[in-house]
Image (cartoon, grey):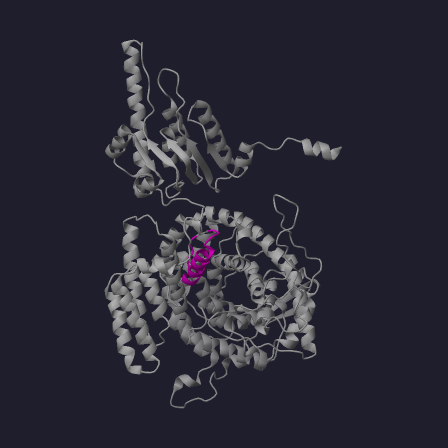
Amino acid sequence: MNNDIAYKSRPPDLPSLLLSERIVYIGYPIQQTVAHLVISQLLYLDYDSQEKPIKIYINSDNEHTKEEGLSTSEIDALNIVDVINYLKNDVITINLGKAYGPAAIILASGTPGKRYVLPRSYTLLRQSPATISFRQAEDIAIYSDEILKARKAIVNVLSKACNKETSEILERINRGDYMDSQIGAEMNRLFMIPRLVSRSDLSNWVARRSYAKNHRSGEFDRLLSRLERSIDHSRTDESVHKNVASIANEFLNNKHTFVEQSAFLSKIHKYEKLEEKFWNKYLGKLNERLAREEECEVVCEESVDELVAFSEIARVLISAGKSSVPLSRYFVKSVTSNIYNIIPREIRVFTRMLEYLVHAGSKNKLDPVVFELLEDNAWKIKPTNLISILYNLGKLGDRDEEVIRAFSRVLTNCLAKGILRPYDKTKLAKAYSLLNYEHITFFNQISKELTLIFKAMDYGNYFKKEEKGINYVQGVGLRGGKASGVMVEGLKYIQYYSNESDEVIEEPKRVEFEGTDEQLYSCGQMVFILDAMIYLRIHHLEPEFKNLISYALKHLYKSEVMEHFDVEQLRSAVSFLATCRKSIDDHLLENVTKRFVREYMDGNVTNAQLALFLKDLVKLTKIVVKRRNVRNRLLHTSTFVPPKWIHNQMYENADPMDPNSTRSTLEHLCYKICDNFKRFTIEDLTSCLRSVAYLGFKNEKFYSLFIPFLRQNLKSLSNVAVSNITQSFNRAGVKDKYFFYLLGKQHQDYLHSVEEKVYIKRIG
């Protein structure tokens, strides 16, 4: 009986379902009742959330007036426009089929850059006709004045929304300007329509060779052929280097399309003897071109293949270690304006954009529409791309809870099937750590896998050395490999059913776990995963983590193992020790520190990685002394004892004629910090100063060098930065009363600007 009642219960109506997805649909001619409904829906959505965007779908021809007299459609449309302007939300307007007359006003009043038309839609600019007959002369005069007032208001609204002269708008209204989607795209200055929205397979977004050739001149093809021949000959004849340099200069001195640039860069970046000045000159010309287009407010209407070219340019710049801030902005703007075509069909362009933003250190936040599309299309995106998106979003600090949940459902499904590779799981563990997302099911599976591998290592069954290569990702490991399978029986995956029958289609098979026969994870990957679990404090929730700690100390912290770690895995290893409060042999820790400092001096370690490494190294020197006071209360006193080996000579074979070769590890590090200090962020620089002070470097001149720079950037100092500076200067015995006064004043100003008061003990 209950089942029958539940079956016969009334389902929600369609407008309510649309409203729950923040969609307002205008499918009737604009009139008073329609305007009343639309305004009420907009106000409700504004009350529900002032951050999420509102989508208005329009399909209105406005042919409803049969009564005689003045039409109020324009007034009703202007009322809707006023409410749209009142809202704090971004309003996305989309023409589904027709936007005639007043509906065109609503279409043009959406948020700039978010007004769209479908390929076969039509937009008409005109004023609704009014029939006036058998009236008094006074009534006709009043009606005429009202018609002119309505027309003036419409012209002003369209002129302001479209950034056009009123005379041009008035001319189009008078003649009744019909525009199909193609004309609307060509005349996009009128409605600022950035692109045609099409979810059909109108174009394949693969960078087709035919397209590339059609958009490359014959002269450029000859230049590219010369470059390929010169690079091939340079492998056997070193004198060909001049030919490559002349071809590079010829490329820089001519203007090329982005498709041509991507083709040329993809070839020349493989040339090992390419000079630094080529990249500097290319980036200078690229920045100038993009800056000019931004000043002209050029609307990003790149085709699919041009966006693929952008992604290829970004890939080459990442591999060359170069970045361009204007390219980051332009890339984001182009992808965002074409986002409906990119997600999910060409998701690799989107992932390449995120990778470049991480590489360039961009702080720009993505549009909320992007997150909505990612959430809606999670099941259509490949697991490797899902993991890459989560990983890069975590690196960017751009977190969206709904996207994380949607992606996690899909990835848990893949985990239950056992189709994820060790590389994927390692990267996903770090992604969850960066996003601060505690996925207990995932980490329970990973901890069981690591435990099984550690137990096999007790018997000396295997030892996997990580191999470096072109596809190697720092910390995560080498891309590729096969699926590792699943060992936890409790994990379940979703089965797919067709709509027409109850038969299961493409039922995935469960892959058995392969860890009993081989070491799936390298030792570097294992310590990288353990560091991610500690960052999320999973070790408080996972009962097996204590066993993992003992296993890791036994098998991973050996010189023959750690020599194969990359710099990020070395940092993770030190962080793991500091958080778990474990110690290792001083000689091993000294070698790890020396190697990390040498890598930093060679440019293989970022300033952020150095700050984290030194901070965890200081934690390892912390000694907590417990004692009771006169009131018999237990007190914990923390002291930091610098390790003696930090002052040892860094290089064993010292040259007596070279004073630099006799410097200690800490001195070499401080000299390099002085060279790079302008490339630091304020937080990383102050953290490094505090760390080297607690490690025993007390040269007052070293710390005094940074005072002018810190005073210049005083307003950007956070309370944590003030605390780091104070502690480092007090530790080193630096005395500057006026600078300490400025620090105290900055800290007081900071406390007045925040609600959560943070107390900082200052002794200076």
The image shows a total of numbered marks equal to 0
> Is 673 left, or right, of 617 in this rendering?
left
For residue 393, above or below residue 530? above
Question: In front: 158, or 686?
Answer: 158
Q: Position of residue 630 (x, y in %)?
A: 69, 64
- Which residue reaches farthest right? 1
Q: Quadrant of residue 186?
A: top left
Placement of 735 over or under 496, stated as above or below: below
In the image, is residue 747 part of the stretch drawn in magenta?
Answer: no
Start and end of the magenta stretch? 343-364
Instruction: Name the dominant secondary structure of the magenta segment.
Output: helix
Q: Which residue is located at x 46 percent, y 41 percent?
A: 53
Examine the rendered structure and indicate whether residue 266 appears above or below residue 346.
below
Q: Position of residue 351 (x, y in %)?
A: 46, 58
Foreground of the two, 620 or 156: 156
Give the camera-side residue of 105 and 548.
105
Q: Is residue 554 visible?
A: yes
- In this rendering, the answer to whether 698 lies above or below 363 is below
The quadrant holding residue 83 is: top left
Quadrant where the image shows the N terminus: top right
Front-most of residues 170 and 564:
170
Q: Position of residue 278 (x, y in %)?
A: 30, 70
Question: Is residue 275 in sight in this rendering?
Answer: no
| Residue 436, position as x, y percentages in the image | 57, 57
| Residue depicted at 26% across the width and 63% down the height | 218
Q: Is residue 356 magenta?
A: yes
